[in-house]
Amino acid sequence: MTAPVAPVAIVGAALRTARGDDPDALARMLVGELPPPAPFALPAPWSAYPVRAVAEIPGAPARSPHERILRRMGLHAHQVATEALRRSGVACGDRLGLYTGIGGLRAQWQDLIPALRDQSADFSASWSRGLRLLHPYWMLQHLSNNTHALLSKDVSARGEGFTFGGANAGAQALQAAAAAVVTGAIDAALVVAYDSLLEPELLLHWRGQGIPSEAAAALVLVADPAAAATAAVADPAAAASPAARPAAQAWLQARTAADAAETSDGDAQALPTAETVAAACAGWERWSHLDTAPWIAAPPPGPARTPHRATHDVTAILGDCGAATSIVQAILWATQLSRAASTPDASALCLSAGLPGLLGAVRVSSSR
Amino acid sequence: MSAALTSSSPAVHHAETVRLAVAEALNLDPATVGPDSNLMDDLGADSLAFLDIVFRIEQAFSIEITRGEMERAARGDMSAEEFAPAGVISERGLERLRELLPEGGAKIAPGLRATQILSLFTVATFVKIAEGKLTGGAQA
């Protein structure tokens, strides 16, 4: 865990979820103003696995020249990031950083099974028995930084940036991006994360907590919304919408933690402990809304008897979005808090967890 | 393509399969891809895209197109040294190219380098390579 940094402003966002891509409608579902349209079902491809329902993003990503390199979720991520940046009006160039989070390693069985199912025990004639079915770009298509590399070029994000991987990657990307913005390493950060839990190796061992899902989500962070649109642009031709002046939807802080106790005793299935949650949220005792999945059993910090406290769960309406959860939470709460302007100083403490013992904590507030 | 061919003939089917494979690989509307389309100049293919095109054609016809076969599509049975000494295609090599890859047109000119041969390829070039493999002919 790193030292807490000052809040940064959210000035642009976009997402793809199993319940659609409209943050306003999703925020209303989150706070119970709109009912989710229908229960999630279990499509045929996953019927052999011990899950009762899965939540997949409806529809394919828009056609793109990047299809030869990026797979479905990478394309979704590229597209939400581009949308978020366009909506923000933030200038591209040397002072725009890109922070990407991608869920854990996947075996890519959809490609591997056809290539492996007819192999012999001694792997003789392996090429003709199936390896020839692997696309020549196969390794290239599954590099974890593909989306980052193509996106940074396409939107001209030439400031510092990182790609994070693993169950907590979205929260890590948020934390690093916010720190870079606050310290002045960059003027603005484009943060995008994507993950799909609809993978055989996950569904076979699903813990029965929530519904496995997927999401791609992106937001744009700046330290000072008023100054962001006039930031120096090294390449004016690459600027997104220099005439637009971004307005803060909400303010954000992010922290991450890894529960060392869980890894030392070899329990890779453990969730963060109460102590880890409390440590990650230290100093954030004031919040009006709590967004946490029920399987994060640790008690949250804060005034338990605050009159307007309300508990919500983004995973209850969208399923478990894995490494993208923190960014989805941030987007929905920024939308909700900016919409509910009648509640000044409202804030949401959002917790997400990944295995083993990983915690993402995001605080979204309506004012700095 | 011969006017005598019917729409159901294997040759027409092969040509259409290759055309669709090229369109798919390059993420193009198939209507914009014709047999005479130059892959690089007209369709925007880069060298990486050629790998994708070959892969799709291999899968579609259950064939394997090796690098050597791609080279033979351009230089026939000439040796590499005879065809392009020091990387620049010789006069005899150019003659062979005009014979085997007439779709290259005016691009087949003195100074052409062996590394530039892919720029001569059209959709029809891949149709010839595929048909050569399927019929066991000398082309491929």
Image (cartoon, helix red, strand yellow):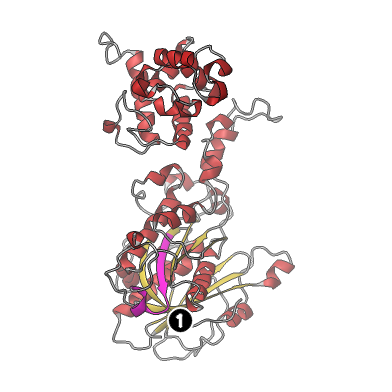
Q: Which residues are magenta?
A: A216-229
Report which quarter residue A22 is drawn in: bottom left
The residue shown at (30%, 68%) is A242
Residue A160 placement, left or right of B36 = right
Q: Chain of mark 1?
A: A
The quarter of the picture where the N terminus of chain A appears is bottom right
Q: Amino acid at mark 1?
A: Pro
* Residue A50, image x, y percentages: 54, 52
* Residue A194, image x, y percentages: 47, 59
Which is more toward the observer, A165 or A124? Answer: A165
SS state under label 1: loop
Write down the residue under mark 1: A7
Q: Is residue A144 magenta?
A: no
Report which quarter residue A219 is drawn in: bottom left
Which is more toward the observer, A120 or B117? Answer: B117
The quarter of the picture where the C terminus of chain A appears is bottom left
Q: Is residue A221 magenta?
A: yes
Question: Does any portion of residue B44 appear in the rendered image?
Answer: yes
Residue at the far right in the pictured view? A265
Callout 1: few (<14), some (14-19), or many (20+) C-alpha neighbours within 10 Å? many
Residue A176 placement, left or right of A221 = right
The residue shown at (49%, 16%) is B75
Report which quarter residue A348 is drawn in: bottom left
- Residue A17 vertical position relative to residue B114 in the rendered view, above or below: below
* Residue A43, image x, y percentages: 42, 48
- Residue B120 vertical position relative to residue A268 in the rendered view, above or below: above
